[in-house]
Image: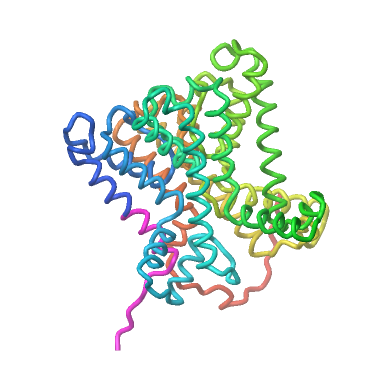
Amino acid sequence: MQKTKKLSPAHTIPISFLITILVGALLLMLPFSSANGKFTDFLTSLFTATTSVCVTGLVVVDTYAHWSFFGQLIILILVQMGGLGMIAIAATIMLITHKKFSLGDRMLLQDSFNLSSGTKLLKFLTRVLKGTFIVEGLGAMMYSFVFIPQFGFAKGLWISIFNSVSAFCNAGMDVIGQGSLANYRNDPIVMATTMILIIMGGLGFVVWFDILHSVKEGVIKRFSPITMVKRFSEHCKLVLSFTLILIFGGMLIFLLTEYNNPGTIGNMSFGEKLTNCLFQSITLRTAGFTTIPQENLTVASCLVSYLFMFIGGSPIGTAGGVKTVTLFLLFMNVRSYVRNENQNVIFNKRVSIDSMRKAAAVVYVSIFATLTLAVLLSIFNPVPMEDALFEVVSACGTVGLSRNLTAALNPMGRIIIIIAMFLGRTGPISMVAFFSGNESNKNSINYSEGIFYVG
């Protein structure tokens, strides 16, 4: 008997993203998807579908001008699907249709969210969906106080919904007009709502639920706020600590490097400088909205931007990048070696060897992929290396910021960025696993230890 070989999660997840991108591209090609009622070429449609599903935000045509309402609706659906993940969407359909989950379905869902085997998957999925729609609904309501009076009820409501979903999913796309949020950089409602949505999406669902559980338990048992925080899980504590350091550390760095730059914040009041530097620090963590021209950033700010875009958000959320926890584990590995420690301990909890190895692999493969694609972009689409690197890091980190380069890319340049966005959403390490197959012969042979000189 011939055994039917099923696809593993390492194959199914990237394929699900690819199929959705292709279907989205075909829909966006249709005449009623464009504002002028004409067909859109395949490469432009493919680029837009990829940036939507991969929640990146880089665009070669203006979303508000080129696409009709139907086209914008398709983009919004793709963004929502990309933010939650294809497998989560498929699982949702199975829940609605009351189809039973097989063991393989549960393993696939577990891999798509990068969860441990002990997690109650269906309960977790239900909470993710409820939480997502509640947060996006509140965000749309807050936006509507600004956009409905400005654009009228119908258009204002649509802009509010689109912006809320885009911000929460860290997509960075909008249908407001030219300049992203530059015209709202002094509006407290728009700025605060956008930053909160970006952070909420970037923290990760596990952190949400851990905070809610600890607070609920603390209220019932009348714990003090300090005790509630102490009862957070080690993952939650690490994510919150590192996120706060990155957000406010980035704000201070941008304030110092851009303070007198007239091309960015030089002509603003001190309060406006603080707000926009805070926004810049947050949006670099894979969101893609902007209030200042990225092409006018100083060299020092550019270097910091590369790092922030590369790091991205936190695990099991809507953000991209190598993730905060991943990079911190890499730092811990260096620290333990320098201090001659035989284990890595965070908040009195030991980090497993597998987690340390995975963190190192993710970072190293991501660096290799980013540098390779940046070199290819500079070869096939000759541009200054700092602009090429900014574009590729933004694409691989699913950020969506650009130094005014995306629309000027030639066909080969667009293909390179499409690849970068796809790798950024599925993860370079996932693509390595995809092409390496399922079989492994690790530990089948024990070799004698060799002598290698390092450093």
The answer to which of 414 and 308 lies nearer the viewer is 308
Coloration of the structure image: rainbow
Q: Which residues are magenta?
A: 1-19
Q: Is residue 392 visible?
A: no
Q: Is residue 238 visible?
A: yes
Residue 13 lies within the magenta run: yes
Q: Position of residue 455 (x, y in %)?
A: 71, 48
Query: Would you identify the image quadrant in which residue 420 lies?
Result: top left
The answer to which of 3 and 275 lies nearer the viewer is 275
Query: Would you identify the image quadrant in which residue 166 lies?
Result: top left
Q: Position of residue 96 (x, y in %)?
A: 38, 65
Q: Position of residue 259 (x, y in %)?
A: 65, 16
State the residue at coordinates (81%, 50%): 226
Residue 272 lies within the magenta run: no
Whether 1 is drawn above or below 344: the answer is below
State the residue at coordinates (40%, 45%): 79
Q: Where, quadrant-wise, is the N terminus in this rendering?
A: bottom left
Question: Along the horizontal axis of the image, is 412 left or right of 375?
Answer: left
Question: Along the horizontal axis of the image, is 256 left or right of 98?
Answer: right
Q: Residue furthest bottom?
A: 1
State the residue at coordinates (62%, 18%): 272
Question: Along the horizontal axis of the image, is 78 left or right of 340?
Answer: left
Q: Position of residue 75 (x, y in %)?
A: 34, 42
